[in-house]
Image (cartoon, helix red, strand yellow):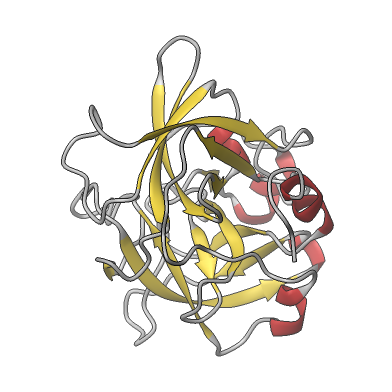
C-alpha cells in the first residue's frame, strides 16, 4: 500500500487514511474475473499494490492515489496469485490531472492501459451520469471487490486473493462532494468492508457489473468503520475516462 499525506478537509471531517482488502468478506473465485490486482512501480523501482476493474480489453480503472507517481504497472486477474514476481500483464498508468492527494475535493481516479488485450466475455461497466444520486443511501446492498488485507487486528491477514463483501451506501452528497460513504460492519447479515490494497477496487451496484465508485479511503488504519469511495458517475471522472474509452 502506498502512503500519501492527507489534506485538512479529509482529516477534519473523517480522520481518514488513503489506500484501502475486503474485510468480513468471502473469496470471490470466478464471480468477478474482470477485477484485478494492480501492482505499480515508480522510477526508482519502488512498488505498491492496489485493485482495479477491467472496463475493456485494455483499460483498467483504479484510484488516482494508486497511479500517482507510478511509471509502470502490471495487472493480474487470477482469483489467487501465488507470486507477484511473475505473470501479469504490463501496462502504463495515467492519473487524473487534477488529482493531488486524497480529499473530498480531489478526483481520485486513474487508469492503467494494458500493453496487450486481455479478452473476457464480460467486463466491468461504467454508470450513466448521475446514477449514484438517484440510488442514494439506504438499505440497498452493493458489492465491493479487491485484493487488499482481509484483517489488521487482531490477526494481520494478507492473502493475495480476490475477495468480495456486501456493503450499504450510508451517505451521498453534501460535505462528501463527489464521494460516497459506505458501511463496514462485521456483525450484520450484509457484512463487508475495505482495507489497504483494495484502493482502486470497485463498488458495484448490487450484484451487477456496474461500477458506481472506486475505493479511496477509510476511517482508520485498522480498517474499521466507514469507508469513502470516489464516484465515477460525476463529470470529472467521466471527462477523464472519455479519453480512454466510450462513456455511457
Position of 123 compared to 159: left or right? right
The picture places residue 247, in percent across and down from the top left corner, at 74, 60
The picture places residue 145, in percent across and down from the top left corner, at 41, 62
Q: Using the rendered view, name the quadrant where residue 13 is placed.
A: bottom right
Tell me if residue 232 can be seen.
Answer: yes
Residue for point 51% across, 81% down: 206
Q: Judge by depth and name the residue closer to the eye, 77 or 116.
A: 116
Q: Judge by depth and name the residue closer to the eye, 62 or 227.
A: 62
Residue for point 34% across, 87% down: 189
Q: Using the rendered view, name the quadrant where residue 101 is placed.
A: top right
Q: Is residue 97 above or below residue 107?
A: above
Position of 207 compared to 77: left or right? right
Q: Is residue 45 above or below residue 113?
A: above
Quadrant assignment for the C terminus: bottom right
Quadrant assignment for the N terminus: top left
Q: Judge by depth and name the residue closer to the eye, 239 or 47.
A: 239
Which residue extends farthest top?
44
The picture places residue 203, in percent across and down from the top left corner, at 53, 66
Position of 12 compared to 86: left or right? right
Amino acid at each position: 500500500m502506498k502512503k500519501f499525506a492527507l489534506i485538512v478537509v479529509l482529516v477534519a471531517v473523517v480522520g481518514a487514511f488513503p489506500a484501502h482488502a475486503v474485510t468480513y468478506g468471502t473469496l470471490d473465485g470466478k464471480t468477478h474475473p474482470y477485477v484485478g490486482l494492480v501492482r505499480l512501480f515508480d522510477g526508482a523501482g519502488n512498488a505498491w499494490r492496489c485493485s482495479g476493474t477491467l472496463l475493456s480489453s485494455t483499460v483498467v480503472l483504479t484510484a488516482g492515489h494508486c497511479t500517482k507517481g507510478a511509471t509502470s504497472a502490471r495487472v493480474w486477474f487470477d482469483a489467487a496469485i501465488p507470486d507477484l514476481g511473475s505473470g501479469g500483464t504490463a501496462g502504463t498508468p495515467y492519473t487524473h490531472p487534477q488529482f493531488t492527494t486524497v480529499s473530498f475535493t480531489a478526483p481520485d481516479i486513474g487508469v492503467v492501459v494494458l500493453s496487450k488485450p486481455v479478452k473476457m466475455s464480460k467486463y466491468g461497466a461504467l454508470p450513466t451520469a448521475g446514477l449514484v444520486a438517484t440510488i442514494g443511501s439506504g438499505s440497498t446492498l452493493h458489492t465491493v471487490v479487491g485484493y487488499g488485507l482481509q484483517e489488521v487486528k487482531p490477526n494481520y491477514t494478507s492473502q493475495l486473493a480476490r475477495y468480495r463483501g456486501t456493503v450499504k451506501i450510508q451517505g451521498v452528497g453534501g460535505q462528501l462532494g463527489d464521494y460516497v460513504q459506505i458501511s463496514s460492519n462485521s456483525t450484520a447479515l450484509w457484512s463487508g468492508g475495505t482495507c489497504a490494497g483494495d484502493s482502486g477496487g470497485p463498488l458495484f451496484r448490487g450484484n451487477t457489473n456496474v461500477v458506481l465508485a472506486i475505493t479511496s479511503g477509510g476511517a482508520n488504519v485498522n480498517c474499521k468503520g466507514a469507508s469513502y469511495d470516489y464516484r465515477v458517475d460525476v463529470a470529472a471522472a467521466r471527462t477523464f475516462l472519455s479519453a480512454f474509452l466510450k462513456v455511457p
